[in-house]
Image (tube, rainbow, N blue to C red):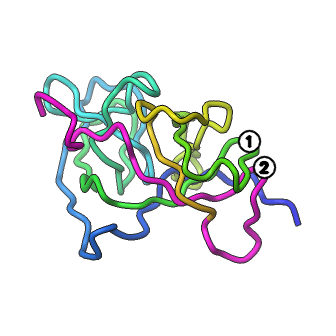
Amino acid sequence: MANVDNPHGLLPLYSLGGGPWVHEEFSKAVGYGTALYPGDAVARVADNTIETPATPGTTRITGVNLNWGAASKATTHLVVVSPDVVFDCQADGSLDEADMGLNANLIYNAGDATALKSGHEVNSATEDVTSTLDVHLLKKLAVPGNDYGAYARLEILINKHRMASDAVGV
């Protein structure tokens, strides 16, 4: 059975350390003209507010947003900031078992304004061995109706995390 194309962003599943994940409150500035959705990867900017990361593969990810915030409105967001949290995220195209263990960038698609859910996905065209890509592909999410191939739901770990051990100036 084919997987359904149903992007939902990054949904926290568990922490590799076994404990609860850490979350923090951040603000979205009134001047930021993009809505934030639950499941959106976010990055801290110079004024300590959060936005969608500027460029896949280059912008360090602060964490994953857990609540909705309207465009051009000042809103407060709860963000999962633990660097060891594993997330459920859909691939935008086809990924197979042989791709697990590789890395890939995210695609920061706009969210669904009706369902209020993220449109962020794993970019299946970017899988490679380099650890400078946004996420590490762990395995297929074990849920009924999910198979490798187009739109597979995957367990991923953020590589380009602001709190990663190789980050400076956090």
The residue shown at (33%, 68%) is: 15
As helix, strand or loop, the secondary structure at mark 1 comes to loop
Look at the magenta stretch and give its main secondary structure.
loop
The residue shown at (65%, 75%) is: 143
Please tell me how crowded label 2 is: few (under 14), some (14-19), or many (20+) other residues with Cα within 10 Å. Answer: some
Residue 153 horizontal/vertical position (percent): 64, 59
Horizontal relation, residue 129 to residue 53: left or right: right
Q: Quadrant of residue 89?
A: bottom right
Q: Quadrant of the C terminus?
A: top left
Tell me: residue 22, above or below residue 54: below
Looking at this view, is 155 or 38 the one in front? 155
As helix, strand or loop, the secondary structure at mark 2 comes to strand
Q: Amino acid at mark 2?
A: Ala
Q: CA distance from mark 2 to mark 1?
A: 5 Å
Looking at this view, is 47 or 15 the one in front? 15
Circle 1 residue = 93
Residue 4 horizontal/vertical position (percent): 78, 58
Query: In the rendered structure, are the residues bearing label 2 and label 1 in contact, judged by CB atoms less than 8 Å apart?
Result: yes
Residue 71 horizontal/vertical position (percent): 39, 34
Q: Quadrant of residue 55?
A: top left
**Over which residues does the magenta segment extend?**
141-170
Whether residue 98 is visible, yes or no, is: yes
Which numbered disc covers residue 150? 2
Tell me: residue 152, above or below residue 52: below
Which numbered disc covers residue 112? none
